[in-house]
Amino acid sequence: MSDPILELLAAPPNPSMSVDEEAVHAGGRRRVRRRALRRTAVGVAGVAGAAAFAFAALGTGADRDALPAGPSPSIGAAGRVSAEVLDGRYAVEVVPGAPSGQPNVVFYAVEGGRRQQLAGSDASPDVVSMGTGSGAEGVMLGTAPADATAFLTVTRDGSSRGGITTDHQPLPGTRYQAVALDFDVATDVDGYVNTIWIDDAGEVRSANGSLLPSVPIAGGDRFFVARDAEVMGVFMADGSGGSTRPLSSGESTTMGYGQKPDGGDWTWRSLSLLPAGAKDVAFEWDAQTVLGLTTVTLGPSGEVLAWANASSPASGPGPRVTSVSWTDEGGTRHTDPVE
């Protein structure tokens, strides 16, 4: 029988899609305090690079008593370390010192205080490894490095029809943490492509552990580019998550994010990724107040990141950049509309 996850990883990329910035404004965006269980920002991409796997049955799958009552995580027999995720519906267990060729991570469904073994995997502590299968419909379970502090899920272009809830819990004494993704629409799990994560040192990596070009921006947020996943994005400094935007097929890509507190005005930040050597960058805004524009060179590629903040009255649709202009290394002036 064919496996949908493996077929997904082998499939050719789909065309990129655009992000409707006006729709983002219309919906409003409010920062919330950090929670262990929260909604994730979902990006789109066409290249699979994540360590995704399909569940394979382990042993008999017989029921196993839940670990003794108490706060998750728990330590069981033989030093196994376990944590429950998604409000106790599932559990992820690390098996220290597992024999070669045997799973070092085991996944369970939890119901009525008992655990039903679903599957296992041989997971490296340096990557994000996610899997799904029978008994976890619409859910992906896995592990991530212990020092990962936030995650952004990337899905295949146009495949996600609902939201995604992410939960991550520590597995003390190990180099892992438990991670779970719960898709509002169960079949959206087939569109999973990648997980971008940031560690406590501020380094941004793809699921396979590859270091991504990134740079700090105003307020402590961190911008990154993931070429293999065909997205760029931002992790928020307050740990509340972040957002991604597909890289365009043109010379520049622009994204924006912000908030409108209850009773307050819009505050917004727009960022543009421009070709190497771009200078004299200018944003054309549909906004009331615009603060100064900042540019920085992004890593070895020499690409230029430009960003600026703006505000506008709460009664309006919110600030947005309508076009971006810059001068290239040869002295030619360019203007790209922002759609």
Image: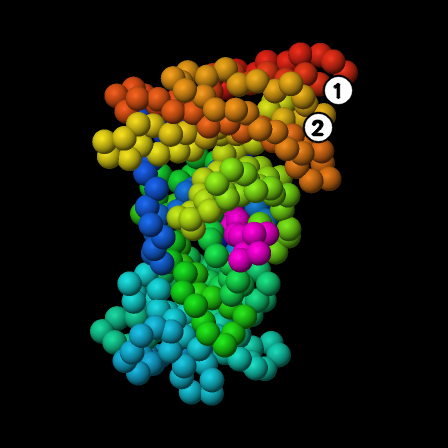
Question: Relative to 69, is 97 on the left or the right?
Answer: right
Up-down relation of residue 257 to residue 138 (above or below): above
Q: Where is residue 148 in the image (x, y as percent from the top left)?
A: 51, 59
Residue at 62% across / 79% down in the picture? Answer: 100
Is residue 253 placed above or below 85 in the rendered structure?
above
- Taking depth in this image into account, of 221 and 122 the one nearest to the observer is 221
Magenta range: 193-203
253 over 202 or under it: above or below: above
Q: Is residue 278 found inside the magenta-colored segment of the image?
A: no
Q: Of the residues shown, which amino acid type is indicated by label 2?
A: Ala
Residue 329's mark?
1
The three-letter code of the residue at mark 1 reads: Glu
Asked whether 70 or 258 is in front, the reply is: 258
* Residue labelled with disc 2: 276
> Which residue sits at x=51%, y=65%?
146
Q: Number of labelled discs?
A: 2
Label whose residue precedes the other's in the sequence (2 or 1): 2
Callout 2: few (<14), some (14-19), or many (20+) C-alpha neighbours within 10 Å?
A: some
Q: Where is residue 26 in the image (x, y as percent from the top left)?
A: 31, 26
Task: Locate residue 136, reporting x and y percent.
Answer: 36, 61
Asked if residue 252 is positioned above or below residue 212 in the image, the reply reads above
Work out whether residue 280 or residue 130 is closer to the camera in this orientation and state it: 280
| Residue at (57, 18) in percent of width and height | 282
Q: Residue furthest right?
A: 330
> Which residue is located at x 67 percent, y 34 percent?
297
Q: Do the residues labelled 2 and 1 touch (CB within 8 Å)?
A: yes
Q: In what element is the residue under mark 2?
A: loop
- Membership of 197 in magenta stretch: yes
Quarter of the rendering containing residue 280: top right
